[in-house]
Each structure stands twice: as structure tokens, then as C-alpha cells.
């Protein structure tokens, strides 16, 4: 049984609706289906507006899908009543793209990482403190910096804080929404290595949402390509990169600038 | 051959409560006629401040503290504001990263291109309109006759970037400085815009200073490369040499950290983080992150060493006396 399964997921937004005008329907996610096996990294790629982020958010019910099914360990997540959903959230977490805006600037790093434990009423104060220190070490941060504010950390360190917060509740599934695209090249590699280490260590399952195909090729076992709300191609990363079938996938792959002056795109 | 643009010992500082901080520190390079020089670096490396310094658009608390910027034989730092105005936007044009903020939302794109032509005394009225249409056609915007009446928000990101390129080309500049021109764009649109830049460079006989953090873009577009780190150019060379035989540990680290190789393998990351400009380590600014660090690295910033044909690197590994 796959860990997470999405079937016919659909999310429509209405735009331009006024008092009288009915407005147009935007099919941000349009009948999307895929399954993620335990322990794998599943890549969701596409350009801006393709619906990849909305798909990830629908899976965690950060936005409510219009239609479709999301199953987590075989259970229908969309049918969960609020208390059950809250419990389910411990197991499914998200890391956002921009660590400059996703962390509350008024909170200290310790508070940011501890907050999920407080919200879910896990552990006494002392236990929580100890857990935060462990999490800090886990993501490669120095516990001496626990009392600092987000602005005192670099972009890469901030993303480590976001990751520590996401891991605080011991999730098995993490949605990584463009987790390194706001970071410098030399720091990207560090965070990618950390993500791969944590996956091994904690047996995590990732949904990796990205537009950087080189990264996806590197860390995902399987990948789905989204275009205008639909999945146009899906398969093992190796096969899809070697022999893309859909014209859009071909266009996407041929558009990647190759970091080799002798292999210039024609 | 005489270079089109020569930057010599450029230093641009920002005045902070703790004293001046050099965002650009003794930077020298040249852009030759007809070439594309790629200026590559991470955020905070000083590449954008270098671009702004060339056309003297650095805003306080930033200021140019020293150096010479010689364009077509004239030192731009010695020009008065009036003479500079004639160069800026006309002889040297700038393309910014974010096409939405670089365009004025309340004027049509036709107005904005025509304004460039008018300000520099190239054309007014109907002639300006006709030229604007031709420019939009040159950057391959469909139906330019009706598109000139569009406002920026009616265009996609890629189309807006084409408009900015059209504006940059309006006065037939000799040099175009493009600061991360494709960073905000999707990869398929990026490919189109890079193709367009290449075509325009040939059609308009331009030299291009291309600023980017993306080594893929550099490999595709640049003839020569200058690598910046913490306000200094640490390595320069022809694009092939930089990618095949990088001589500075930072350049090597950057190239090694690009995903590739065996999927699932750990990437070869550069340890640590980019230092803050106000708190640079003594000696070579890269030394705390450098795998090849040895004694001289912490003593004084290394000078340029000639490490190959047309290739220099600021690294003591190449000093015959110390290495």
C-alpha cells in the first residue's frame, strides 16, 4: 500500500467574481492522480501556475480541494473531522519555499521550532526544550543560537529552522515546496544533502515540489510533470529524463541550461 | 583591441553605523567589443552593485569610493551628471531582473519605449511610435501594432522581459548590462529570452555584461567569465577554461555543487555560508570555507595570479613561493 495516494484531485478557484458577475473558474489542479510509496522521494515538477504547489497544499488540506480523494495510510484524509485531522497533521508536514517569509520574525528560533509541540500539547516544558535542542542538532544548527531571531540567520540556516519545525512532530511524510530555490547555489547543495540524510535517518517520505529539473533528477525516484493543472507525464526519474514522451516534458528538459560550454543548447 | 569598457580598481562602499563596508572591493575587468562577459556570483557577492556602479546608479548609503570606469575612452566617474545622462540608457543600457517592477504600471509599453527615445532625443511623436513598434517586432512580440497600447500587467513575464530588452535596445547602445535577466522566469521562457538576447547581440552588434548566479546560463551565453565572491573577483578566464580547469577553490566548489553525477549521491557542497560584508575574515574572504586553506590564506587577501592563457585566480595555491 502506498503511504500517500491522490486520486482525481481537483481544485478550482474562481476569479473576478463580483456581486453580479459570476467570474471565471480556474482549474488550478485538474483531475490529478498519483501515489507515493513509503520512503521514496516523489517529484512534482512544473512551471509557475502549473498547480504543483496547490496540489501539495490540497494533500495537507491547507486548502480544501474541490473534488477528489487523498488517502494517507489508506485512510481518506478529506473525510477526517477536525480533531482527527489535527492528529493526522502530526504525520504530514510542509516546508515552504521562502525561509525569509515563512518564519515569524518576532519569534526566536527556539519558539519557532517548539511551537508545533506546544500546539499539539506534547511533553512538559523541560521535555520540549530538550527536544528542540535535539532538533537543532539534527538539522545541523548550533544549539547556542537557539535564542536568536530569524533575521540573525542566513537563508540556508533559516531553511534548517523551518525543517526542524516540520520535523518536531515526527512526521512520516513531508511536502517540500521548492525548499532550496530561494538559496544560493553553494548552500542549496548543503540543504539537499541534509534532506537526503534526514530521509535515511528518519525513514521520511518526501513530496518534492520543484521547478529545477537538475535537482529533481538528482534526488527523486519518481516524478510527475504538471502543466496547466494536469499531470502530463509520470514515471521513474531515470526513464523520464532519458526518454521523455510528452512534448511538454521534452520542451522542459531541452530548456534546461546545461552547465557545460561544449553542450550549448541549439 | 581596445576594450569597450574597462573597470579599474573599482571600490564601492556602503556607509553603515559601524563604518564603511566595501560591497565591491578593488574590482578590475574589461568588456571587449562584441563579447559577452558573464559575471557570476552568489547573493551579496557584489555583482549587482558592480553593475550599478558602472552607470553610477548606486544610491546612498552606497557610494563609489575609488577606481576608474573607462567606456569608449572616457572615464564615466569623471563625467558630470548631464554628460552621464547621455551615456546612461543610450550608450549603456540596463536590463533588470524583475520585469514587473522595472516597468511603470500606469503607462502603456508604447509610451515607455517612446519615452526612452524622446529623452535621448532620438525620436518624438509619430516617429517614436513607429520606432517603438519596430523594436517590439525585433524582440519578437506578436502584433506589435496593437501591443504598444498594452499596460505591463497585460503581458506575461516573458513578454515583459522582451519589452525591457526592446527599451534597452531603443537607442542602439554599444553595451547592455543584463542583471539576472532570466531569474524570475520559468525555464522554458528563460530559454526563449536567452535565445533572444543572443540574437539581439548579433543583430545590434552589442557587447553584453551578463550578471547571473546560474552557471548553466553562463555556460550557454558567456565568452569569458568573472567569478565574484564577497566583493572581489576571485577568478577570470574564457568560459571553457573556467568550466574545464577552474583554478580557484571557490569556482571549483561552485561547479561541484551543481546537481549531476549519480542520482541520490550526496552533492559536493561548499561548507559554511557566504560571509557578511561587514565581517569578512582576514586574508582571503573564502578561507573559512576553503578545502585547500593553508597558512598564507589568513594573512592578507591574495593578489591575482596568472594561471593560464587569459586566466587569473586570486589564490595563494598559485604562488610559486608559498605553494
Image (cartoon, coloured by chain):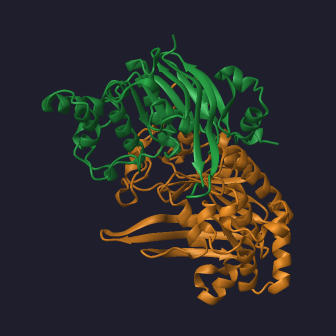
- Viewer-proximal residue, A92 or A192? A92
Q: Is residue A262 above or below residue B101?
A: above
Image check: B142 left or right of A183?
A: right
Give x and y (percent) for residue B211.
Answer: 62, 57
Q: Position of residue A15 (x, y in %)?
A: 59, 51
Q: Colour in which chain B is shown?
A: orange
The reply to whether residue A206 is in sight is: yes
Chain A display color: green
Q: Is residue B204 visible?
A: no
Residue B18: x percent and y percent? 30, 68
Give me the residue at 67% from left, 66% from top.
B152
Residue at the extreme front = A20
Say which quadrant the C terminus of chain A sits in. top right
Residue B278 on image: x %, y %: 36, 61
The answer to which of A89 and B18 lies nearer the viewer is A89
Task: Classify residue B170 by image quadrant.
Answer: bottom right
Examine the rendered structure and indicate whether residue A120 appears above or below residue A36.
Answer: below
Q: Quadrant of residue A116?
A: top left
Q: Compared to A180, does B79 lie above or below?
A: below
Residue at x 76% of width, y 67% of height: B166
Amino acid at each position: 500500500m502506498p503511504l500517500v495516494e491522490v486520486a482525481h484531485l481537483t481544485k478550482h478557484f474562481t476569479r473576478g467574481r463580483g456581486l453580479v458577475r459570476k467570474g471565471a473558474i480556474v482549474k488550478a489542479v485538474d483531475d490529478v492522480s498519483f501515489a507515493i510509496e513509503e520512503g521514496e522521494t516523489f517529484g512534482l515538477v512544473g512551471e509557475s501556475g502549473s498547480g504543483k504547489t496547490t496540489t501539495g497544499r490540497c494533500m495537507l488540506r491547507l486548502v480544501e480541494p474541490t473534488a477528489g480523494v487523498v488517502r494517507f495510510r489508506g485512510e481518506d484524509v478529506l473525510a477526517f473531522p477536525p480533531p482527527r485531522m489535527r492528529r493526522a497533521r502530526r504525520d504530514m508536514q510542509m516546508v515552504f519555499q521562502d525561509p525569509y517569509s515563512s518564519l515569524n520574525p518576532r519569534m526566536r528560533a527556539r519558539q519557532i521550532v517548539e511551537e508545533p509541540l506546544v500546539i499539539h500539547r506534547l511533553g512538559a516544558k523541560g521535555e520540549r526544550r530538550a527536544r528542540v535542542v535535539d532538533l537543532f542538532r539534527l538539522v545541523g544548527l548550533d544549539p547556542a543560537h537557539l535564542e536568536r531571531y530569524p533575521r540573525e540567520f542566513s537563508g540556508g540556516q533559516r531553511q534548517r529552522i523551518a525543517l526542524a519545525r516540520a520535523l518536531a512532530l515526527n512526521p512520516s511524510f513531508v511536502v517540500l515546496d521548492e525548499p532550496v530555490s530561494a538559496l544560493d547555489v553553494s548552500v542549496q547543495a548543503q540543504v539537499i544533502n541534509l534532506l537526503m540524510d534526514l530521509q535515511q535517518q528518519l525513514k521520511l517520505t518526501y513530496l518534492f515540489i520543484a521547478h529545477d529539473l537538475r535537482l529533481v533528477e538528482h534526488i527523486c525516484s519518481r516524478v510527475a510533470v504538471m502543466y496547466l493543472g494536469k499531470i502530463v507525464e509520470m514515471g521513474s526519474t531515470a526513464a523520464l529524463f532519458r526518454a521523455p514522451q510528452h512534448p511538454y516534458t521534452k520542451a522542459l528538459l531541452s530548456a534546461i541550461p546545461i552547465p557545460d560550454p561544449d553542450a550549448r543548447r541549439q | 583591441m581596445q576594450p569597450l569598457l574597462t573597470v579599474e580598481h573599482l571600490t564601492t562602499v556602503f556607509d553603515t553605523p559601524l563604518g564603511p563596508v566595501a560591497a565591491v572591493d578593488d574590482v578590475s575587468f574589461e568588456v571587449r567589443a562584441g563579447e559577452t562577459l558573464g559575471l557570476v556570483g552568489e547573493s551579496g557577492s557584489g555583482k549587482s552593485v558592480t553593475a550599478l556602479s558602472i552607470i553610477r546608479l548606486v544610491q546612498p548609503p552606497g557610494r563609489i569610493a575609488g577606481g576608474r570606469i573607462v567606456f569608449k575612452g572616457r572615464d564615466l566617474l569623471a563625467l558630470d551628471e548631464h554628460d552621464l545622462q547621455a551615456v546612461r540608457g543610450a550608450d549603456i543600457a540596463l536590463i533588470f531582473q524583475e520585469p514587473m517592477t522595472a516597468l511603470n504600471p500606469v503607462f502603456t509599453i508604447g509610451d515607455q519605449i517612446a519615452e526612452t527615445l524622446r529623452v535621448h532625443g532620438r525620436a518624438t511623436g509619430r516617429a517614436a511610435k513607429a520606432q517603438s513598434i519596430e523594436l517590439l517586432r525585433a524582440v519578437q512580440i506578436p502584433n506589435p501594432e496593437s501591443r504598444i497600447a498594452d499596460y505591463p500587467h497585460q503581458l506575461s513575464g516573458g513578454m515583459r522581459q522582451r519589452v525591457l530588452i526592446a527599451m534597452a535596445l531603443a537607442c542602439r547602445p554599444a553595451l547592455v548590462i543584463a542583471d539576472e535577466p532570466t531569474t524570475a522566469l520559468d525555464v522554458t521562457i528563460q530559454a526563449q529570452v536567452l535565445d533572444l538576447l543572443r540574437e539581439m547581440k548579433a543583430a545590434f552588434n552589442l557587447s553584453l555584461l551578463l550578471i547571473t548566479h546560474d552557471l548553466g546560463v553562463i555556460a550557454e551565453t558567456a565568452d569569458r567569465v568573472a567569478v565574484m565572491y564577497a566583493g572581489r573577483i576571485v577568478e577570470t578566464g574564457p568560459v571553457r577554461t573556467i568550466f574545464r580547469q577552474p583554478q580557484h577553490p571557490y569556482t571549483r566548489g561552485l561547479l561541484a555543487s551543481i546537481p549531476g553525477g549519480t542520482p541520490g549521491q550526496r552533492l559536493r557542497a561548499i561548507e559554511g555560508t557566504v560571509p557578511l560584508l561587514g565581517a569578512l575574515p582576514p586574508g582571503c574572504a573564502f578561507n573559512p570555507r576553503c578545502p585547500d586553506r593553508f597558512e598564507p590564506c589568513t594573512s592578507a587577501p591574495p593578489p591575482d595570479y596568472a594561471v593560464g592563457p587569459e586566466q587569473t585566480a586570486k589564490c595563494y595555491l598559485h604562488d610559486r613561493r608559498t605553494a
